Image (cartoon, rainbow, N blue to C red):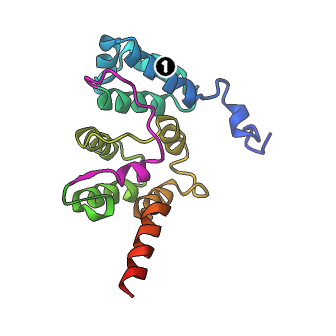
Amino acid sequence: MTEDGSLDDPVAADVFPHDSAALTAWLTTLVRNREYGTLADLRRAKEPTNAHIRAGWYGGDKHREIFEKVAFLFAIYHQGRPVPSYGYGSLGAAARRIGDGTGRGPDNPGAQRLLDRVVASRRIPWRHLQHAITRLRACDQAPPSWAQLTEDLIRWNDRKARVAYQWSVEFHTPATRSRAAQSKQTTRKDATT
């Protein structure tokens, strides 16, 4: 114990630890089983429903609100979708997929402004996160990994984790080209010389 009476290990202090993978499994099961009523309940952000409370169970005592709101984002993305998406990568990597024919990610001014608003916030930017998820859905692009998003939001204010910075880095990281594309370009250069 510390001098102020709190436990040394903050995870041990959480009587019911969180489980973001279990939340994702439950949410994807709702889509697979076509439990549209429960998913609709999760999309009701103004008033907590039984579905929100159930999502909060996976967050334990300390992270209930984050788990409820990630479940809301999941339900927004999956509205009308018959197949669940576990997503992949961080929100920064997912934001690289936002865009249209004029460009995606850093090449799309709308995606750039959206990510700038997300990472500039000191508190978790729920409204901007909802906008990012909605844009990914509209662009028919995969969402971020729901489990990773949950873990990132748990660590949002952890200065060592630097979640917002990592999202920015992943958003601006240049796309890697495949070896086949690189060798094809090398072949073209050799042919012109």
Query: Between residues 102 and 67, which one lies in front from this camera angle?
Result: 102
Q: Name the residue beneath numbered marker 1.
A: 26
Query: Mark 1: which secondary structure?
Result: helix
Residue 43 spot, x, y in % from top left: 29, 24
The residue shown at (33%, 18%) is 39
- Is 86 contained in the magenta span? yes
* Magenta span main SS: loop
Residue span colored magenta: 79-100
**Crowd class of label 1 (few under 14; some 14 to 19; many from 20; radius 10 Å):** some
The residue shown at (43%, 61%) is 168
**Residue 50 vertical position relative to residue 166 in the rendered view, above or below:** above
**Residue 127 vertical position relative to residue 33 in the rendered view, above or below:** below
- Is 2 contained in the magenta span? no
Q: Which residue is most to the bottom?
A: 193
Rendering quarter of residue 162: bottom right
The residue shown at (28%, 56%) is 111
Q: Which residue is most to the right?
A: 1
Q: The N terminus appears in which quarter of the rendering?
A: top right
The residue shown at (42%, 68%) is 184
Rendering quarter of residue 28: top left
Q: Is residue 71 left or right of residue 156?
A: left
Residue 130 spot, x, y in % from top left: 31, 40
Residue 95 spot, x, y in % from top left: 35, 51
Amino acid type at mark 1: Trp
Q: The C terminus appears in which quarter of the rendering?
A: bottom left
**Residue 80 vertical position relative to residue 192 in the rendered view, above or below:** above
Query: Between residues 79 and 42, which one lies in front from this camera angle?
Result: 79
**Residue 25 vertical position relative to residue 139 in the rendered view, above or below:** above
Count of marks, rendered view? 1
